[in-house]
Image (cartoon, helix red, strand yellow):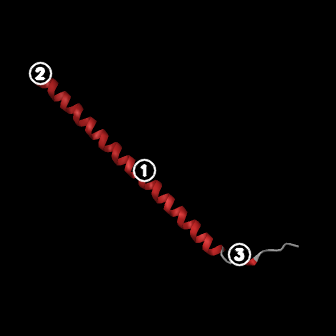
């Protein structure tokens, strides 16, 4: 015979909502970090490309 504590199960829906909210917040946080990292990497690549073009133009002038 299995005895369940029904009082403990009264809060189960609330706990599921909290778990879902926490999961959503974590997913959004990780996605935000990825977007930030990609933008930072793109900016760094643009700066390197601009320096490379500047170096090539300097070589052509000499």
Q: Residues within 10 Å of mark 2 (few under 14, many from 20)?
A: few
At x 39% / y 52%, what residue is drawn?
35
At x 27% / y 40%, what residue is drawn?
46
Residue under pointer 1: 34
Q: Secondary structure at mark 3?
A: helix
Q: Nearer the viewer, residue 42 or 26?
A: 26
Residue 37, horizontal then vertical, whole percent: 39, 47
Residues at marks 2 and 3, CA–CA distance in whole angstroms: 80 Å
Quadrant, the N terminus: bottom right
Residue under pointer 2: 62
- Sequence-wise, the earlier of marks 1 and 2 is 1
Residues at marks 1 and 2, CA–CA distance in whole angstroms: 42 Å
Residue 55, horizontal then vertical, whole percent: 20, 28
- Sequence-wise, the earlier of marks 1 and 3 is 3
Marks 2 and 3: which is nearer the front? 3
Relative to 16, residue 29 above or below:
above
Classify residue 35 as left or right of residue 58. Answer: right
Residue 44, horizontal then vertical, whole percent: 31, 40
Q: Which mark is residue 9?
A: 3
- Sequence-wise, the earlier of marks 2 and 3 is 3
Relative to 22, residue 57 above or below:
above
At x 34% / y 48%, what residue is drawn?
39
Q: Residue pushed farthest left?
A: 61
Q: Residue pushed farthest top?
A: 62
Mark 1 and mark 2 in contact? Answer it, CB < 8 Å. no
Residue 20, horizontal then vertical, whole percent: 56, 66
Q: Quadrant of residue 56?
A: top left
Q: Nearer the viewer, residue 23 or 53?
A: 23
Residues at marks 1 and 3, CA–CA distance in whole angstroms: 38 Å
Q: Which mark is residue 5?
A: none
Quadrant, the C terminus: top left
């Amino acid at each position: 015979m299995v005895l369940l504590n029904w009082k403990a199960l009264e809060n189960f829906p609330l706990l599921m909502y909290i778990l879902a909210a926490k999961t959503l917040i974590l997913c959004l946080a990780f996605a935000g970090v990825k977007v930030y990292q990609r933008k930072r990497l793109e900016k760094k690549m643009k700066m390197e490309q601009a320096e490379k073009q500047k170096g090539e133009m300097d070589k052509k002038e000499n």
